[in-house]
Every structure is written in C-alpha cells, then in structure tokens.
Amino acid sequence: MEIRRYRPSDLAQISQLFYDTVHTVNAADYTKEQLSAWATGQLDLTAWNDSLLAHESFVAVINDQLVGFGDITVDGYLDRLYVHKDYQGQGIATALCNELEAATASTHLSTHASITAKPFFEHRGYGVVKEQQVTRNGVQLTNYVMEKKR
C-alpha cells in the first residue's frame, strides 16, 4: 500500500469510493433514507477538490486502485476518512489516520465520527465530547464530536 498526497486527478475515484462506502459500510448503522441524504451521488466536485487542496489530504493506493482517503485541517480537525468497501479491515484507515495526525502540528485533534467510525476513533484515543444530530438534505443523522489531546 502506498500513502501519498491527494491530487485533483484522484477526485473521480474519491467520489465513487465515498458513495459506495457510505452505502455499504455504514448501512448497518443508518437507514436507507439517511444513507441517501449523506451520500447523494451528486458531489460538488469543485468544492470537494478545493477543500481537499486546502487541507492536508492523503490517499491510499494498492495496485493503482485508490482504496482510501482522508483530510485534516491545519488546526487538527479530521474532516474525512473513508476506506473502500472492498478493503475494510486491512489497516488502511489506521495508516491514513497516522499520516493525517502527523501532518498537523496541532496538539488538539477533533473529528465528527459516524456511528460506524466511533469505535475506530475510540481505539485511537479519541473521546466522545457529545452525541449530536446533524441534518443532511432534510434528514437527521447521528454522529459524535470526538477529541484527542496529544
């Protein structure tokens, strides 16, 4: 597995990976309506590209296949972390998260973790600050504000 910086040419694969991952990996924790509101299949590619370029963003690649991606802001907010539905449980999220956390000098790390991702972040030393309801396309979803000090 290779971890490298995000390139705009990765965006099409990221868009598909995001949609597929949400609709399969998160399906045990969210309803179909919630999944469709979260990942509509209609990403604003310009906004995502701008955001990924503005953050410290990395992708994981195996045999020329993009299998994961993540990004973190300079002040330590881990915005996105997704692993391809067919590559779960292979240490990809851990490798990406290690790279993301190392890319920021912030001593305060935070994220908004899905129900599905909460145990992963707890295992990494993040604690739940609060459970919250967020609205996506008119539909409420539960996630967790989580923080880690280092």
Image (cartoon, grey):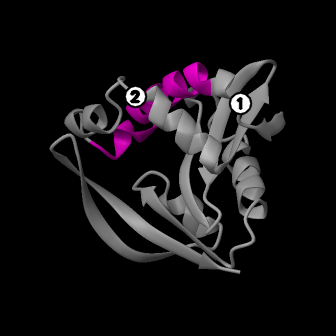
The answer to whether residue 142 is left or right of residue 150 is: left
Q: Residue at x 65, y 63 (%)?
A: 74
Quadrant placement of the N terminus? top right
Query: Is 16 on the left or on the right of 37, as rendered?
Result: right
Please say if 71 is above or below 33.
below
Q: Residues within 10 Å of mark 2 (few under 14, many from 20)?
A: few
Q: Is mark 1 on a helix, strand or loop?
A: loop
Residue shown at 71% from the left, 81% from the top: 150
136 on left or right of 5: left
Q: Quarter-wise, where is residue 40 in the image?
A: top left
Q: How crowded is mark 1: few (under 14 residues within 10 Å), some or many (20 or more)?
A: few
Numbered circle sitting on residue 43: 2
User: Residue 135 in the image: x percent, y percent?
Assistant: 22, 51
* Residue 121 % position (x, y): 57, 63
Image location (x, y in percent) of residue 104:
73, 65
Q: Which amino acid does label 1 sit on?
A: Arg
Magenta region: which residues?
Answer: 11-30
Q: Considering depth in this image, is 113 or 87 the residue closer to the camera?
A: 113
Q: Residue at x 71, y 36 (%)?
A: 6
x, y (%) of residue 100?
Answer: 71, 55
Three-letter amino acid code at disc 2?
A: Leu
The residue that mark 1 highlights is 7
Q: Which of 25 and 2 is in front in this view?
A: 2
Query: In 3D space, how far apart are the residues under numbered discs 1 and 2 (Cα atoms)?
Result: 17 Å
Q: In terms of secondary structure, what is the magenta stretch mainly?
A: helix
Label 1 or label 2, whichever comes before in sequence order: 1
Q: Which residue lies furthest to the left in this view?
A: 138
Against 125, residue 87 (above or below) is above
Which residue, as the protein is rendered here, is positioned at the far right? Answer: 2
Q: Quadrant of residue 122?
A: bottom right
